[in-house]
Image (cartoon, rainbow, N blue to C red):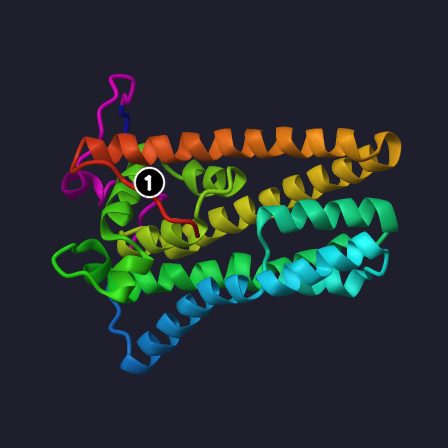
Amino acid sequence: MADDRSDGHVPELSDELDDDRLLGAAPDPTANREWSPTTARIVLALCVARYVVPILALGYAARVLGSFGSGELDGGQVVLLTLLRPAKETLLFAGGVLRVTGEPSPLLLFLAYTPLMVVAVWVFFLLGRIHGPRLTSADEETWLTRMVPPRYVRATQLLLVDRGPAIAILARIVAAPPTILAAAAGTAPVNALRYLVADAIGAVISFGIMLGLGVALGEAYERAGTPVTVATFVVLLVAISIAQNWFQREVARIDAASEGPVAPEAG
């Protein structure tokens, strides 16, 4: 279906959620399936754990940084940190350690990255499938709607319609909150397999970019010392921030055309 977006038009959710462009929307048995209460509780618990575990790992992250400063860091500590807190700054650090010490291996880091940054994010897609009406209704504020804000979910649904399949990949690359995007996709009639494949591709690309940038930081440290490394790190953070701001502006632009400004939460 041809569609010209050059005039800045924002699609209406009610008009276009069934459009075939919505990540290849097709009959999907998970869209209208009845889920058991037990499954729903397990999914909620896993989603909460996805937020809580990285926060609890902050203390361990400080210990790992201390070990690096004292020269006592080993590859196993970096792998465990990646498992517990697979954030972009962790991957940058892991890449630097890999360049300087030669460990841990990229494969081990990716295996550690996968549980919270791939599998757990897909659980949020399932959360959208199971709790779709609660995630898109702002009538009553609950702990679930505080974790996944309804207005942001609806604006992200519109972004999925407006930008198509590439947004799942681009969101990963710019380090946008993958959990909320996945929950929004789960509430919409998107084809689950196509969305999850697009998200997985984005996750792999994002992992490679962040780890590669970390390796570059490690090389800068070896060749030029701390000042140049710090300056390079700041430049990388600015570039990542610009990319994140672009994504947030897109969501805010779409939300402003419907209900008002959005304040995305970190995922």
Rendered location of residue 223, percent (x, y)? 88, 31
In this view, 195 is above or below 171: below
Rendered location of residue 39, percent (x, y)? 34, 78
Let me know if residue 112 appears in the view.
Answer: no
Q: Which residue is drawn at 22% across and 65% down?
A: 142
Q: Residue at x 74, y 64 (%)?
A: 77
Q: Residue at x 44, y 43 (%)?
A: 168
Let me know if residue 38 appears in the view.
Answer: yes
Which quarter of the rendered picture does the N terminus lie within?
Answer: top left
Q: Could you tell me which secondary element the residue under label 1 belongs to?
A: helix
Q: Residue at x 54, y 67 (%)?
A: 56
Name the foreground residue: 24 vs 136. Answer: 136
Neighbour tally class for label 1: few under 14, some 14-19, many 20 plus, Cα within 10 Å? many
Q: In the image, what residue type sits under mark 1?
A: Leu
Dominant secondary structure, magenta: loop
Q: Residue furthest left?
A: 139
Identify residue for label 1: 160
In this view, 143 is above or below 154: below
Is residue 69 located in the magenta-colored stretch of the structure? no
